[in-house]
Image (cartoon, rainbow, N blue to C red):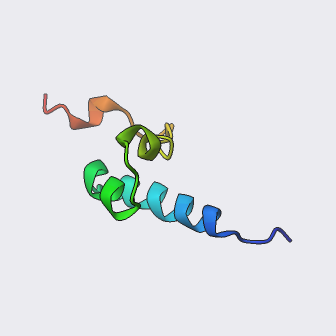
Amino acid sequence: MKKTSSHWLRHFHTSHSLEAGCNLRFLQQSLAHVSVTTTERYLHISPETGSSQFIDF
């Protein structure tokens, strides 16, 4: 069994917050990241999602 680290918990929290629609800038501030680029490292591409889901045809 793998041990859970504080980094893993932060990554898990951030990834799932973003998937749930949390604002990226809010997460940046709550994680105390100076640059949004650091927070963007938590972004992942999911096969179920894409930018087309935000377009209203």
Number of marks present in the image shown: 0
Residue at figure coordinates x 37%, y 33% from the top left: 50
Q: Nearer the viewer, residue 50 or 7?
A: 7
42 left or right of 52 in image? right
Q: Nearer the viewer, residue 44 or 32?
A: 32
45 left or right of 55 in image? right
Q: Nearer the viewer, residue 19 or 28?
A: 28
In the image, farthest residue toward the front: 34
23 left or right of 19 in image? left
Residue at figure coordinates x 37%, y 42% from the top left: 35
Percent of width and height locating residue 38: 46, 43
Q: Quadrant of residue 56?
A: top left
Residue at figure coordinates x 47%, y 55% from the top left: 15
In the image, farthest residue toward the right: 1
Q: Quadrant of residue 20?
A: bottom left
Q: Quadrant of the C terminus?
A: top left
Percent of width and height locating residue 39: 43, 47
In the picture shown, does residue 37 fall above or below 33? above
In the picture shown, does residue 14 fall above or below 5? above
Q: Quadrant of the N terminus?
A: bottom right
